[in-house]
Image: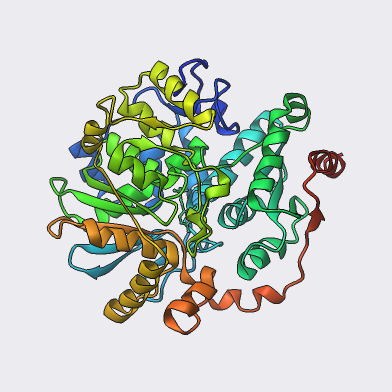
Amino acid sequence: MKYISTRGRSPALTFSEILLGGLAPDGGLYLPETYPQFTDADLTTMRGMNYRDLAFAILSRLVDDIPSADLKAIIDKTYRADVYSFAREDQNAEDITPILKLEDNLYLLSLSNGPTLAFKDIAMQLLGNLFEYVLTKSGQTTNILGATSGDTGSAAEYAMRGKKSINVFMLSPHKKMSRFQTAQMFSLQDNNIFNIAVKGVFDDCQDMVKAVSNDAAFKATHYIGAVNSINWGRIIAQVVYYFKGYLAVTNNNQQKVSFAVPSGNFGNVCAGHTARMMGLPIDKLVVATNENDVLDEFFKTGIYRPRGSANTHHTSSPSMDISKASNFERFVFDLVSRDSAKVRELWNKVDNGGSFDLQATGHLAKVADYGFVSGSSNHAARMQTIRNTQAKYGVTIDTHTADGLKVALDLRDSAVPMVVLETALPAKFEDALVEALGSLPPRPAELNGLEDLPQRFDVMDFDIDAIKQYITEKTR
Ligand SMILES: *Cc1c(COP(=O)(O)O)cnc(C)c1O
């Protein structure tokens, strides 16, 4: 299994070779040369499997340069009930991603029972253990440098904490994350975790990371690595729960299932696309956006028009506040029949601040062949969906999941099971939940008093040299 770049001008590499990096050298994203195929017989075999065995059955087809026994051990260590311990009372933590039935043909797939209460744990925990394995084998170390507005940073830190070969330098906008998110990150006392609060906004943090990553010499001498949303290791970890969700709500492989996915960077739903390309009988992939509707606009009109950070709305589902969807190029590569010259032409426009139109080229008509449909939500609809879900099913959901459920209800075919991905637990977004329901959402008892723990972080100006000097000092 080799991985190729969507832009067609980088050499094909193995999984371990692309694991630690971000973009391919030609600026593209990595994808498998061909998608492995799961047959009817394969799916039947998978029906009886627990999460770990299912993950191994899928990941072993995508990762062929780690010996099977080692890959199995990494997976077994990653997907344990005690790591995904925040399951609802009536759910079995052993399921890792338990399914919750709301009504006939309408389900939530609980992806947020891990340590940071968001679905990003599922992928990041695997990445932490894969990084540690690959680095230990090669005798290397890495310094992960990232920017976060909340969920990515905490998931990365909880996955990498205490790992000898890895340091994490995480930039976040000073005083701009929720109290819960801040406490979750800054209360970590592990000496391989460095929280840097930048006096600025999230985009300033991201610009600092980009500036450091663009300094090839610094990047090489300081072993700078990334765990951002385009990391292929994260995508494949997410493929597993689409299979898990499908198998949980069907009893034969002739049935089709739709998934509704609260989307930002298109990472989560890209994993759904990958699962579908691997043969999972998915009917629709429902892309749900918030007020930042760049993806909804594309699926409705064929026009992909990234907004620029100045035009990003700050919403009550903040983890979906993106102005461009960094994984979207992976889907478009498939949509244009893997024509990398075409992808280069399209992203040449995007990278220069422009847009492109696939209606004009006839590609929009083909989107339906991939199951994609879309819709968007907004603050009022989100609040109403949280209230309705509480009243009708007695289930409290977070603001992101509410966007997914809202769009799912708008677009669903009631004869086809619809699985809405729960991307965070409501405890993570207390203020918005209080606004919707008038009371605090349930919080896992272990996290009571989180905001009162001592915090460890450094404050920094928006200054490229300062972050380079900081990394140099801390890794000396
Ligand atoms: C990151 C995140 C999303 C968006 O996921 P993408 O993979 O970027 O599309 C949605 N909801 C929550 C809670 C998140 O943390």
Number of numbered discs overlaid on the protein picture: 0
* Direction from residue 58 to residue 23 in the image, left or right: right
* Residue 456 seen by the camera: yes
- Where is residue 243? Give x, y as percent: 31, 47
Q: Quadrant of residue 262?
A: bottom left
Which residue is pictured at 72% across the width and 59% down the height? 174
**Image: 270 above or below 182:** above
* Residue 441 seen by the camera: no
The outermost residue toward the bottom is 438
Q: How is the image coloured?
A: rainbow
* Direction from residue 351 to residue 43 in the image, left or right: left
Q: Quadrant of the N terminus?
A: top left
Q: Quadrant of residue 214?
A: top right
Which residue is pictured at 31% across the width and 36% down the height? 302
- Where is residue 414? Give x, y as percent: 15, 60
Q: Nearer the viewer, residue 7 or 185?
A: 7
**Image: 293 above or below 16:** below
Which residue is pictured at 41% across the width and 73% down the height? 88
Q: Nearer the viewer, residue 187 or 174?
A: 174
* Direction from residue 446 to residue 280 in the image, left or right: left
Q: Quadrant of residue 270?
A: top left
Which residue is pictured at 59% across the width and 58% down the height? 150
Q: Quadrant of the C terminus?
A: top right
Q: Nearer the viewer, residue 87 or 463?
A: 463
- Where is residue 436? Give x, y as percent: 43, 77
- Where is residue 435? Give x, y as percent: 48, 78
